[in-house]
Amino acid sequence: MTQTFKVLSALLSYPTAQLQEAVPELTAAIDREALLAPAVCRQLERLMNDIATGDLYDLQERYVLLFDRTRSLSLHLFEHVHGESRDRGQAMIDLKSLYENGGLEIEAAELPDFLPLFLEFLSTLPRAEAYELLGQPAHIFAALAERLHKRQCDYEAVFRALTSLAAAKPKAEDVSALLAEPDPDATDLAALDAAWEDQPVNFGPNAGDGCKDGLIARIRAGRRPAPGVAAATPSRTSRP
């Protein structure tokens, strides 16, 4: 098992008091495995210190603004590849099958492309195989890192770490194509509404008449507890 992937998964999970308390353990796991370059470790250390010492409600609000409300920063990988196209449905099925074949069972309400879940799965694989799979969405990680860098946000460190671990490095043209997509500020409500505008897509004969339920499922996936960290207690921040 590669603990570094579990740490990165935890850092991308919705902030809780339990996650704050676990930061020393997470730091120790990164140091123990020593898979990341010193510069990346220093970036991660700033993020972990921020999580450990920050006001929990402020941390939760930041997380929601970044990863729930901003489509260009979505933690659902297929959002950046398939959007709301019909191809996304089959990709979800294929990824869920990959998890099941690897012995990871997920709840019915969970979407397989949620990045913390993907990293949790990678942590269970032989390291070379995990690095190989990580290379497939490496261009997404690179684009997210650039968008977070623009916002001067410490979460950039997680995506720099993922890019550095991937067996295949992202192609510049693939990263540029993603960065050309709209990237509204989380406080620009009109732009956010336009970015999240539902597209009427059906994935099968029993599918609903739109994507509203899918959007809610994506946001709720952020509640998945960090691996090895207890589930969150109710907080002041409203979550669907």
Image (cartoon, helix red, strand yellow):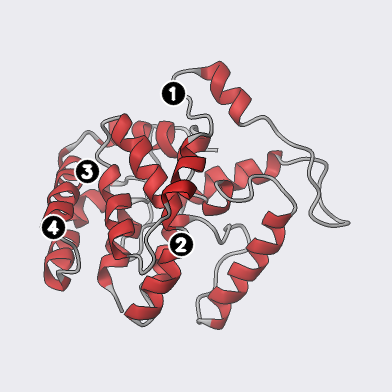
Alpha-carbon distance for marks 2 and 1?
A: 26 Å
Q: Tell me the element at label 4.
A: helix
Disc 3 crowd rating (10 Å Cα; few below 14, some 14-19, many 20+) is: many
* Residue under pointer 4: 24
Q: Tell me the element at label 1.
A: loop
Residue 64: numbered disc:
none
Q: In x, y percent, where is residue 9?
A: 35, 59
| Three-letter residue code for mark 2 | Leu
Residue 65 lies in what quarter of the image?
Answer: top left
Alpha-carbon distance for marks 1 and 4?
A: 32 Å
Residue 38 lies in what quarter of the image?
Answer: bottom left
Residue 51: numbered disc:
3
Query: Do we see residue 68 in this rendering?
Result: no
- Label total for image: 4
* Residue under pointer 1: 185
| Three-letter residue code for mark 3 | Ile
**Pointer 3 with pointer 4, Cβ within 8 A:** no
**Pointer 1 with pointer 4, Cβ within 8 A:** no
Of badges 1 and 3, nearer the viewer stands 1
Query: Could you tell which of marks 1 and 4 lies nearer the N-terminus?
Result: 4
* Residue under pointer 2: 117
